[in-house]
Image (tube, grey):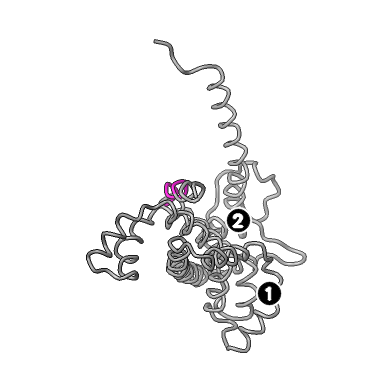
Amino acid sequence: MHSRYSWRTLTREVTLILLALVFLVPLAGLLNVSLKPQDSQTGALALEWPPTFDNYVQAWNQAGLGAALANSFAITAISVVLIIAFAAMAAYPLARVTRGWSRYTFYFLIGGLLIPGQLALLPLYATMRDTGLLGSIWSVILINIGQQMPFSVFLYTMFLRELPLDYEEAALLDGCGPLRSFVTVVFPLLRPVTGTVVILNAVGIWNEFFTPLLYLGGSDNTTAPVAIYGFVSQYVSQWPLIFAGLVISVIPILVVYFALQRHIIKGFAGGLKG
């Protein structure tokens, strides 16, 4: 029996390992600098012993990372939940109705992916100011929902088009209306693509910097990226504190990513088939 392992397989494995090491170098530098004294003059990858965890304590206290992380978590969680609810319900009729208006509505929503968000900065800012939401986390939540809806609707619609109608037809014969059929039958079948929507939106919203800076600037409702930015000034940048803050802020979203990463491929596979 011949082994399928060949020199080509070895070459691919070595190439992938080298690529992985290349991507790990910045992460190693980030962690290494976060453990250095603030007066260190060595390079990012140069090791110093013993490491110090004082940067993490100072970053937590000086930047108020506890409150900032709580705001980031609230904004991310509420935004993602509402995006899932609205995108899934919007995609259901777009995937099941075959009339012309459904197709044109779908294209209209997807067209939102082509519009730069910078075009709406001034009118959105004026709207949030006039409605009294400026400085409130709800301003950022509403902006996030609007920005992430087109891509989320696209993923759900493509996935729904691959789902058979058998379960829905059986539910309708049992007396379920369209809404109840969607909630009890269809939505549980959307778990793979929902995992994709969750992780992609959660990572993007958690790491968002400009939107919270614009709409929450000058208020107490800062987020983690904006709070860490407080260590950067025109003349002095406290890199050990910045990197320590980054390590602290990235841990929660990494936990979510590793918990849901297996759903990403399934969700994209369903969308690409469509």
Q: CA distance from mark 2 to mark 1?
A: 32 Å
* Residue ID at (63%, 80%): 218
* Residue ID at (55%, 70%): 144
Q: Which residue is mark 1?
A: 120
User: Of helix, strand and loop, which one carries label 1?
Assistant: helix
Please give the range of residues in magenta. 260-266
Task: Give me the disc on residue 243.
Answer: 2
Residue type for callout 2? Phe
Classify mark 1: residues with Cα within 10 Å, few (<14), some (14-19) or many (20+): few
The image quadrant of residue 217 is bottom right
Is residue 272 one of those drawn in magenta?
Answer: no
Return the x and y of residue 210 as percentages of the image width and height.
Answer: 65, 68
Q: Is residue 13 above or below residue 205?
A: above
Q: Main secondary structure of the magenta part?
A: helix
Residue 252 in sight here: no
Return the x and y of residue 215 as percentages of the image width and height.
Answer: 62, 77
Q: Nearer the viewer, residue 46 or 263?
A: 263
Residue located farthest toward the left when viewing the structure as drawn: 174
The image quadrant of residue 142 is bottom right
Residue type for callout 1? Ala
Classify mark 2: residues with Cα within 10 Å, few (<14), some (14-19) or many (20+): many
Please state if 98 lies on the left or on the right of 22 as rendered.
left
Rendered-image quadrant of the N terminus? top left
Return the x and y of residue 128 as percentages of the image width and height.
Answer: 61, 83
Task: Give me the disc on residue 254.
Answer: none
The image quadrant of residue 77 is bottom left
Q: Nearer the viewer, residue 41 or 108?
A: 108
